[in-house]
Amino acid sequence: MTTDTTTTDTFPGTPTPGRTVLDARGVTMRFGGLTAVSGVDLTVRSGEIVGLIGPNGAGKTTFFNCLTGLYTPTEGEVRYKDKLLPPQSFKVTAAGVARTFQNIRLFANMTVLENVLVGRHTRTKEGFWSAVLRGPGFHRAEATSRARATELLQFVGLSEKADHLARNLPYGEQRKLEIARALASEPGLLLLDEPTAGMNPQETRATEELVFAIRDQGIAVLVIEHDMRFIFNLCDRVAVLVQGKKLIEGDSATVQGDERVIAAYLGEPLENDPGAAEAAEVEAAQAQAAGHPKDTAAGKETDR
Ligand SMILES: Nc1ncnc2c1ncn2[C@@H]1O[C@H](COP(=O)(O)OP(=O)(O)OP(=O)(O)O)[C@@H](O)[C@H]1O
């Protein structure tokens, strides 16, 4: 399926729903003889949550790295709001693309608030001498940054922990802090790499709500995740990578129902349904105990 890249931008500079913010075309990344990503096209529009799924080693993180300037794609180009993205990560962040990492990368010995303040640096115009001389411009910028960082901690639900050291936060809260830090750069596009890895179901649910709230602020979201329930609940569109290539892209129902996705990723239905006999036995025993004998004869398995 090809993706419509038509832009519907009527108010430049403001997040208009439907405007294409990310436009990646023919992105290919080779490491020596290995092609990790091969000719991938993907667009993301403002107000959209797009999922990127695929088996381990499919090339998802490599693709993210190509989008965020960590890697320079061997072929292809990446545009953000119609402008080619520079191949340096700090410039990509300054342009409006922020990300979180699969392996959390916080400043462990800094406080929660300080971590978010670090994320503000691309939005602070005060230069080196201003910081050294600590003039009125510096103090004004610092106050603005602190106010925004405090607001973001409230937004992700961490305001109570502003003065805690990042390393003392439970895992799920460290992931939230990474998101707050990414948001501190005021992005138009947020890339989340496995935001629920290691989370319990409640934390995953809360992250889902948080991503919806981010989207509602007009920020486009592209998310890699292995938790299929999370992806299919959350995303307007899902793209599937297999062996570096985009296999299919579409809404949740289309992707979930695609035979090739089931075979390549979600797992092929197993022949003869191993475990069916044991499951039927357990069911029969439960029914017996409840005083409702159940017919477990062959041919009744379609009841399940
Ligand atoms: N810097 C690198 N040098 C060489 N090969 C690499 C490099 N980074 C990734 N690869 C290879 O590229 C392929 C894609 O890896 P990648 O990490 O992008 O997959 P993934 O879909 O993100 O996997 P996972 O879901 O396990 O995180 C793998 O075969 C990996 O070993």
Image (cartoon, rainbow, N blue to C red):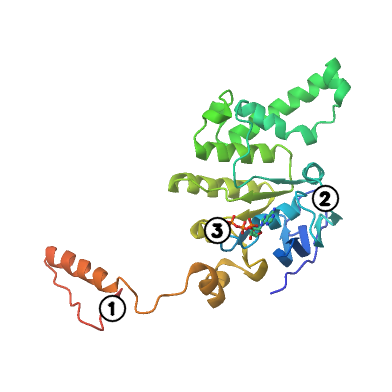
Q: Which residue is drawn at 55% across and 35% down?
A: 157
Mark 2 is on which residue type? Pro
Q: In what quadrant of the picture does the N terminus appear?
A: bottom right
User: What secondary structure is marked by label 3?
Assistant: helix
For residue 109, which numbered disc appears in the image?
none
Please state which of residues 242 and 291 is positioned toward the viewer in this rendering: 242
C-alpha gap between disc 3 and disc 2:
29 Å
Q: Is ligand 1 closer than 8 angstroms to the Cβ of mark 1?
A: no
Density class for disc 1 (Cα within 10 Å; few <14, some 14-19, many ≥20) is: few
- Mark whose residue sits in front, 3 or 2: 2
For residue 231, which numbered disc appears in the image?
3
Mark 1 is on which residue type? Glu
- Is 236 above or below relative to 138? below
Q: Residue at x 57, y 60 (%)?
A: 56
Tell me if 289 is positioned left or right of 124 in this view.
Answer: left
- Position of residue 224 measured from the top left corner of the image (x, y, whole percent): 61, 55
For residue 301, which numbered disc appears in the image?
1
Please state which of residues 137 and 17 is positioned toward the viewer in this rendering: 137
- Position of residue 219 measured from the top left corner of the image (x, y, whole percent): 70, 49
Please state which of residues 25 and 293 is positioned toward the viewer in this rendering: 25
Q: Name the residue under label 2.
A: 87
Mark 3 is on which residue type? Ile
Density class for disc 3 (Cα within 10 Å; few <14, some 14-19, many ≥20) is: many
- Is 165 above or below relative to 260? above
- Position of residue 57 measured from the top left corner of the image (x, y, whole percent): 60, 60
The answer to whether residue 175 shows anywhere in this view is: yes
User: What secondary structure is marked by label 2?
Assistant: loop
